[in-house]
Image (cartoon, rainbow, N blue to C red):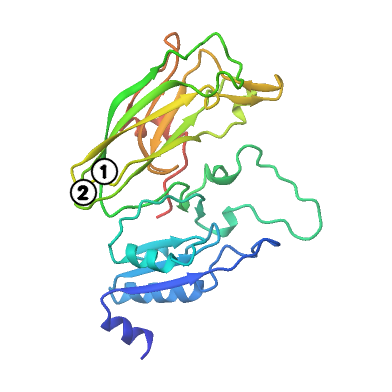
Amino acid sequence: KDVRSTMLEADVAVVCGGATTAEASDRTSLSLEQEAFMVAVTALAKTLERPVITIALAPGAIVAPWRHNATAALVLFLGGQEAGHGVADIVLGRVNPSARLPVTFPAKASDAIAPCEGSAPCEYREGLKGGWHIYEDVPVAFPFGHGLSYTDFQYSVVLDWTPTGSLNEDNDSINDDNDEDAIWNFSVLVRNSGTHAGADILQLYLGMPRSNKELEEEPRLRLAAFAKTAILEPGQGETLTFGLTSRDMSYWSPSMGRWHRPRGRVFTVMLGASSHKCLMAGRFGPASAIGKVPMTAPTCSEPWMLNLYADPPAA
């Protein structure tokens, strides 16, 4: 039978593709080796109004030009001998997925930094804005930290950002004696509001104040912490607490030759489902600083917050 006839008889189509890689050389492309096949089959599935699941075996970041026609997309990185059983458990609904992307999938290959070729010197110009930060102003296919679930979650603040007894605003130097204890704490209640048991992962992103030229070289937001709930039954909740240490709130100052925490400044914080999806946001700082904003979901839509993180994923 041809693909069309087979698909008409099927309830769901599952389309797989992969890419190979080696430690001794760069990949020559971000495309899967079966990209043309996956594009064609997913387009046909959409025409025939058949659900289609794509499964990609990826050694790292990839482009996914078939994503617009896929009903669901699953990416499998470098799994072991039980990877096939794991994929089957997720596709068949035996396991609720909760993983998050450790990389960004760009909308197109030209948005990424091209690998060096030949023996010419390779110059890196991105500075501190490497990795997922190179896409700060570029729409992407799937952002760093992205991942979906078969259930839904709701979030409510239990404790807004509160300084601890370890906070010393007069000490802005960082060393082994003062960089382990949290100096600001925040707690959020995560409740499973859906119909399936599942775990959630929240990501805390921190925006440094722009109080000098060195800080202007920092990424707009950087991942400061993340936390995962237990598997929650529908209606069940769990409180997650995030603590920021002096090191978390510091930057390396070339002029000072040490880690430095800006004093008397307001920091921006975003609680996200990914680096591009804001769940709630706010600002905090010492009592003498102005511009403090409580952590709320509506704050994600404030102009000053929208300017901090990149555009939403490409449609």
Name the residue at 63% across, 52% down.
113
Closer to the camera in the image, 156 or 305:
156
Q: Which residue is mark 2?
A: 194
Residue 288 quadrant: top left
Q: Eyeballing the image, is 57 above or below 229?
A: below
Closer to the camera in the image, 239 or 39:
239
Residue 90 quadrant: bottom left
Graded by Cα atoms within 10 Å as few (under 14), some (14 to 19) or many (20 or more), the crowding at tag 1 reads some
Total marks shown come to 2
Q: Position of residue 193 (x, y in %)?
A: 21, 44
Q: Quadrant of the N terminus?
A: bottom left
Q: Quadrant of the C terminus?
A: bottom left
Q: Eyeballing the image, is 307 above or below 16?
A: above
Q: Eyeballing the image, is 73 above or below 275?
A: below
First in sequence: mark 2 vs mark 1: 1
Closer to the camera in the image, 315 or 18:
18
Name the residue at 55% across, 72% down.
33
Name the residue at 28% across, 62% down.
94
- Cβ–Cβ below 8 Å for labels 2 and 1? yes
**Residue 153 marker:** 1
Q: Position of residue 175 (x, y in %)?
A: 61, 20
Q: CA distance from mark 2 to mark 1?
A: 7 Å
As shown in the figure, which amino acid type bears the numbered disc 1?
Phe
Position of 92 with respect to 132 (left or right) is: left
